[in-house]
Amino acid sequence: MTRATPRRLLTTLLLGTSLLLGGCGYNDFQRLDELVKGSWAEVLNQYQRRADLIPNIVSTVKGEANFEQETLTRVIEARARATSIQATPELVNDPEALAKFQAAQGEVSSSLSRLLVTVEQYPNLKANQGFQDLRVQLEGTENRITVARNRYIQQVAEYNVKVRSVPTNFTAMIFGYDQKPTLQVQNEAAISLPPTVDFNTPASAPK
């Protein structure tokens, strides 16, 4: 019996610890953290999808005579800045890095919107089926970006409420679960609109 006693004590201790951690929200933090990571990965996936579309759009539009070079250059440069940022999973825990990433993606959205407005002045482009197909893909991607961003914002909000609430805030302090920065961009309304795209120059957009 003496040999069994330490084992029973250890079992009881482990069981008690497990119940304590479960009751104080530890398991919830694990679940919510994974949901945040998953929703962030989807945001990145949709931004990458948009970045991959841009060179094709540029290649399609580059043959249009006298197309506004400055408009196209802005799109290419904005894409280059956005794709130069290494969007690691840790980015969601760094408010400053996340803000830079958002700003870069906002520039891409704004430049695409200006491009689509400009293309209205070129009847040949408007009638080009290849361009129209790309435009539909782009608008669909912008919509998916909006959905992915909204889902991420909701997941972060749920996680942050758990960090601030009693008694789970004590668990957060013990295990180092800090609040996560959310997606907040000044031109959020503009980012949510499907962009307008027109491109004209080489498809060698920087990656």
Image: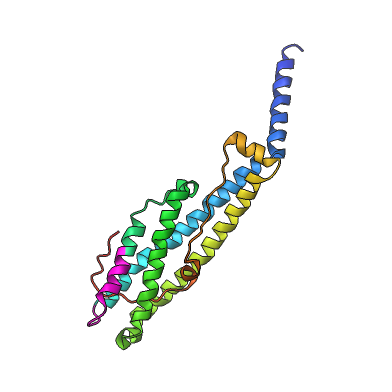
Please, is residue 96 above or below residue 191 in the view? above
Q: Position of residue 38 (x, y in %)?
A: 53, 52
Please state if 79 lies on the left or on the right of 30 as rendered: left
User: Looking at the picture, does residue 125 appear above or below residue 47?
Assistant: below
Reply yes or no: does residue 87 show up in magenta: no
On screen, residue 32 versus residue 140, left or right, reads right
Query: Residue at the spot x=42%, y=62% of the render?
Result: 47
Q: Position of residue 32 (x, y in %)?
A: 60, 48
Q: How many marks?
A: 0
Q: Is residue 69 above or below residue 104?
A: below
Height in image: 106 above or below 196?
above
In this view, the residue farthest toward the front is: 186
Residue 49 falls in image quadrant:
bottom left
Q: Is most of the magenta stretch helix, strand or loop?
A: helix
The span picked out in magenta is 63-77
Is residue 69 highlighted in magenta? yes
